Image: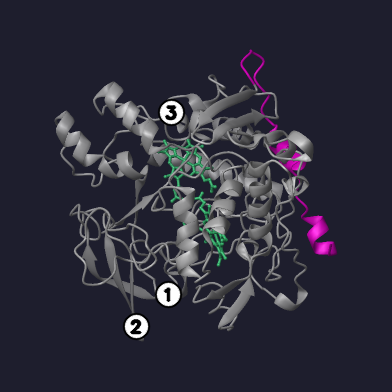
Amino acid sequence: MSKRRSRIAVTIVAALITGAVVAPFAHGGDTTVETKNEFGVSRTIHVGGFPVNAEGNEFFLDLGVNGRRCVTCHQPDNNMSVTPASLQQRFRDTGGTDPIFRTNDGSTSPLADVSTVGARRQAYRMLLTKGVFRVGISIPATAEFELIDVKDPYGYAGRNDNGNELSLFRRPLPTTNLGFLSTVMWDGRETLQKGSAAGLHFDLSHQANGATQGHAQAPLPITDAARNAIVAYEMGLFTAQVYDKRAGALTAAGAAGGPDILATQSFVFGVNDPLGCDPAGAACNPALASFDPVVFTSFAAWSGARDKARAAIARGEDLFNHLPINIKGVSGINDDFGVAVVTGTCTTCHDTPHAGNHSVPAPLNIGVAEPPVPGQESGRGVQNRFGLPVGDMPVYTLRHKVSGEIKVVTDPGRALVTGKWKDVGRFKGPILRGLAGRDPYFHNGAAESLRDVVNFYDTRFELNLTEQQKADLVAFLRAL
Ligand code: HEC
Ligand code: HEC
């Protein structure tokens, strides 16, 4: 480890100390919550002495004006996100009036009709089917590109009084395992002071205020004490699957699944980055990279196990670490490094040991925001060229102001933060833990299941996976 890296070394413990300016809750409540999901049981723990359902903490309090709380969209029972199934239940229970159903960012357009139950079912259909919220961001005035065409099925994006903001439909990232984060939000827009525990604390407290003023429409900023309390709560949470219906306890026979072991793993900003990016992500030198493709080891002990389900999980882990992938046409890798093909693995992009996110901010365009195949009518179920159903998304046509080059996407991603042409369609690689029980996947919720995620990669990178390999990868992903 270089001197530079050791100085900015971030361990989860150090991060917790930074966050621990607020005294943990004295009153009771469970520091462990277990939730059943389709594939078994997931567990969320709090290692800082808070109960997971810390009801007096600001994360659970009504700090805005529309009834929203952080927990409204980040639920312990959904691995700190929300799922379409749980949203449909809430809709049925309340006739679509639960605070999660609000027009500022829950409906397909802020102008949507929500006067009757039927109207609300229509207005909130993206939330109900894909669990996505409408994030509104305008194109920065200084951007290298301009918007020349919008196709928004909901008639709002790109031509409204709100700075002509675009409607971006995005999944709530889980507020757990945050000690491993290098980048806050799908587009990194809350990553302001990266590279240290203090930097992450700053970013998360800035984000906590932004979320209160945005999602919960609070007119004034929240206090520093409230921000610190939220961050202290968030930073202590760890979530992972603990029990698999077929393989049993994910800690049995030498396996190291579950959140208790995950919570003991340290994280160093920039650790294991295959591109040798310095911790600020400013300069990358692949020649200086020290990269080990073996990112996950939790199920190595099950390699060759007599139990078929355990052996499948171990094979899936091995594929994730070792299966060769010809990485082509990925903006953020092939263009930035001027290499037509990088022979990598899943872990080239998911490089943080035991967590699977990228260990430095590395926004990448892997094609999730590609528009429906040209010539097709839009509509639900209509797919892009990699098989993801994106026909219910707005489609934006962007033009480079100087070269006149055109890009068509359903979400410009990082480019709306930086204004840079190269950042169009780029998103962060998120943490890959507690996946079972928080479907659907990708920033736009376009992959309904982990099987769909694997099918996407099979198509996108022409992997020609066998049925067995697909099943093994899925068995592994759902055990995370
Ligand atoms: C209306 C739903 C909603 C509410 C309420 C909400 N969030 Fe979120 N949260 C989201 C969405 C959607 C994203 C992803 C947005 C994006 O990346 O563009 C997100 C992302 C985050 C992230 C980023 C995690 C990561 O991996 O980068 C954190 C942290 C977070 N929220 C914390 C909070 C806190 C703290 C509160 C309360 C102050 C809160 N959220 C309230 C929907 C919500
Ligand atoms: C070239 C980089 C790259 C490679 C290779 C790659 N990923 Fe990803 N992965 C990403 C990025 C970037 C995202 C977020 C994309 C988005 O939502 O727009 C992502 C998202 C995911 C998600 C969704 C997580 C969530 O919370 O929604 C899963 C699961 C996943 N990847 C699994 C895999 C598997 C399995 C492989 C190997 C077969 C793989 N990835 C290979 C970059 C990569």
Of badges 1 and 3, the one in the foreground is 1
Say what secondary structure mark 2 lies in. loop
- Give the percent coordinates (x, y) of residue 217: 36, 36
Q: Which mark is residue 405?
A: 2
Number of residues whose C-alpha sits closer than 10 Å to that of mark 3, classed few (under 14), some (14–19) or many (20 or more): many
Tell me: 170 left or right of 260. left
Say what secondary structure mark 1 lies in. helix
Of callouts 2 and 3, the N-terminal one = 3
Tell me: 337 left or right of 369. right
Residue 142 quadrant: bottom left
Residue 341 quadrant: bottom right
- Give the percent coordinates (x, y) of residue 114: 18, 35
Which residue, given by chain and number where applicable, does mark 3 sit on?
A: 63
How is colour applied across the structure in the image?
one colour
- Give the percent coordinates (x, y) of residue 188: 52, 56
Proximity of marks 2 and 3: CB atoms separated by less than 8 Å: no
Q: Which mark is residue 421?
A: 1
Q: Residue furthest bottom?
A: 403
- The alpha-carbon separation of the residues under discs 2 and 1 comes to 10 Å
Q: Nearer the viewer, residue 239 or 436?
A: 436
Residue drawn at x 21%, y 54% as measured from the top left: 156
Proximity of marks 2 and 1: CB atoms separated by less than 8 Å: yes
In the image, the segment drawn in magenta is 1-30
- The alpha-carbon separation of the residues under discs 2 and 3 comes to 45 Å
Residue drawn at x 81%, y 56% as measured from the top left: 7
Look at the numbered disc 2 and say if its residue's Cβ is closer than 8 Å to ligand 2: no
Query: Is residue 245 one of those drawn in magenta?
Result: no
Residue 439 seen in the current view: yes
Of callouts 2 and 1, the N-terminal one = 2
